[in-house]
Amino acid sequence: MTEPTAALIDESGRAAGLVRRPAGSALALAAGLLRTARPRQWMKNGLVLAAPFAAARLLTGAEVVRLAVVLVLFTACAASVYLINDARDAEADRAHPVKCLRPVASGLVPVAAAYTAGAALAVAAFATAAMACNPDTAALLAGYVLMQLAYCVWLKHILVVDLVIVTTGFLMRAMAGGVALDIQLSRWFLITSGFGALFMVAAKRYSELVLVSARQDVGATRALLGSYTTGYLRFVWQLAAGVAVLAYCLWAMETGGRPHGLLPWRQLSMIPFILSVLRYAVFADAGSAGAPEDVVLRDRALLLIALGWGVLYVLAVVNQ
């Protein structure tokens, strides 16, 4: 085989992701796949615990195991979407100053490997949910994956719809635990969770737009971000925050008559809930709510308010 021919075969093999790798690179490939799956984002899947907690459900050992399984399966579904999305956007990411460092765009993970791993995770999650949980959970997970893939391919280019899809993804996470344990989801839970998610999603978009506008580099970020205005996104997160607070207050005031226990714990839980929204709005208004998990985990005041709400909610459940 001539040297030019060998070089051509080697180059084509690299482009297809089929070039033979050294034995030690298997570990690098696995690490690259893990990075592509966005471990930092997995904490969002903790929302699957929301429905059982909101329902004040005392779980059996078997239900705890099932809830843990759902948490893992939702994480697998989210990871599958990240893998497929990065494989699809590999070429565009290579031209981006930051995204070019992603494992797929940089060539650490072959495009074919990312597609294969993503599809395998999605199919395995669906099959496991059908066997270990119930058909409704499997359908919810399948719907989540299909919706997110449609978002990656098409829906993220439609104004307003992109906000709704991301919000729905959070809402589906919050519903998953209840669906898996056959818990009836209350209308107040769905409204509060849905508009609370929209509040955080719109605040994140607002913060991103404020940041890129300051750098005069709107074109280097999300495709639709430049189509929004800061005034519109501010309106969305303020509206969503108001509806979430109203829904929570209506739920808390739903019980009439004399309070159970020493104090009306359920009604008192409105105070830290409203304070948490007001505190988060400080970061949203300043344009620094780009990563919700960072805002929640790094702000001590917000964590203390959340702890106070948790204590009052538990007291409300115990004394109901």
Image (cartoon, grey):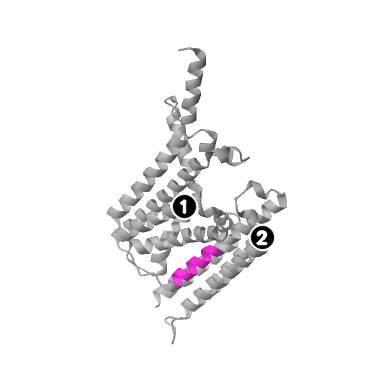
Identify the residue at image location x=39%, y=74%.
Answer: 318
Eye-nearest disc, 1 or 2: 1
Identify the residue at image location x=43%, y=73%.
Answer: 187
Q: Is residue 193 magenta?
A: yes
Residue under numbered circle 1: 150
Find residue 236 and report its horizontal and vertical position in percent: 60, 66
Find residue 62 and report its horizontal and vertical position in percent: 29, 59
Residue under numbered circle 2: 229
Helix, strand or loop at disc 2?
loop
Disc 1 or 2, which lies upstream in sequence? 1
Q: Main secondary structure of the magenta part?
A: helix
Most extreme residue toward the top, as rendered? 2
Identify the residue at image location x=43%, y=46%.
Answer: 80
Helix, strand or loop at disc 1?
helix
Is 242 positioned to the left or the right of 30 in the image?
right
Q: Which residues are magenta?
A: 188-198
Quarter of the figure with the N terminus: top left
Is 127 positioned to the left or the right of 45 in the image?
left
Quarter of the figure with the C terminus: bottom left
Q: Is residue 117 magenta?
A: no
Asked if 96 appears above or below 54 in the picture, the reply is above
Is 135 positioned to the left or the right of 152 in the image?
left
Q: Nearer the viewer, residue 36 or 304?
A: 36
**Pointer 2: residues within 10 angstroms few (<14), some, or many (20+)?**
few
Q: Amino acid at mark 2?
A: Thr
For the question of whether residue 275 can be seen, the reply is no
For the question of whether residue 77 can be seen, the reply is yes
Find residue 45 and report its horizontal and vertical position in percent: 45, 55
Q: Amino acid at mark 1?
A: Ala
Q: Nearer the viewer, residue 234 or 40?
A: 234
